[in-house]
Amino acid sequence: KVADATAGEFKMTPYIRIDAGYALLNDATGSGRNGTNRATTIQNTGFAGVGFGYQLEENVRMDGTFTYRAGMEIDGKDGASRTVSGQVNSVSAMLNLYYDFNQAHDWLGSKTFTPYVGAGAGISMLKTDSLNTTSGPTERGTEVYNLAYAAMAGMGVSITEKLTADFGYRFINLGQFEQDGSFSTGITGAATKFDDLMAHEFHAGLRLAF
């Protein structure tokens, strides 16, 4: 599909992308067999992602991305004030839509820098390892699938006609995660469940058009 644009012809262009960055996680409180979990912290972590997309119009892009986040340590106290520790792992698949502010080219007198904003929605998988409790039983982990959503902003920096460096920020809500309620003592009880896992993510990457 080719559209006639003011400065000539515009052609829809596919691109691939790679990204890496660092995620700052919120504290995800929750509850379990001993009541409300308190002072639960989730360790910040690194992440890496890949994606495929299209430049749909001069100002509009769309892509699908897959992101893996390294294991995040869980540390806190349960309702009985006993220390708990574990880990949660995350992958997400998102469909994203962006608006590129090409108007900035006139403001800056250069086509090198292009700020953008965006939003995305998709699916996250959160998988927990065993949750260990000081002087208490270990609770087995499980997988949970959630609706995820995100808001983005960043800057594209043109390196060549086809290659763009991408520096950006993303707020993402990955949904709730939990243990499975099976304990090392052989009993089954109320599963430990945590509130939504949210992150402020900062990334750098490359987009290659072809």
Image: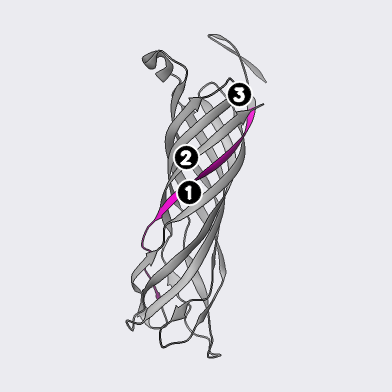
Q: Which quadrant: the N terminus? A: top right
Extent of the magenta region: 14-31
Residue 29 among magenta residues:
yes
Overall secondary structure of the magenta section:
strand
Which residue is situated farthest in the top direction here? 7
Q: Which mark is residue 162?
A: 3
Inspect the image, locate mark 3, and give the three-letter code of the amino acid beneath it: Lys
Q: CA distance from mark 3 to mark 1?
A: 29 Å
Its colouring scheme is one colour
Callout 2: SS: strand
Determine the CA span between mark 2 and mark 3: 24 Å
Q: Residues within 10 Å of mark 2 (few under 14, many from 20)?
A: some
Please name the amino acid that badge 2 sits on.
Answer: Ala
Numbered mark located on residue 165 in the image? none
Residue drawn 61% across the image and 41% down it? 51
How far across and down, in percent of the image, does residue 13 sit? 63, 25
> Residue 149, which numbered label?
1
Q: Nearer the viewer, mark 2 or mark 3?
A: 3
The mark that comes first in sequence, 2 or 1, is: 2
Q: Which mark is first along the chain, 1 or 3? A: 1
Label 2: which residue? 119
SS state under label 1: strand
Say which label, 2 or 3, has the lower sequence index: 2
The crowd level at tag 1 (other Cα within 10 Å; few <14, some 14-19, many 20+) is many
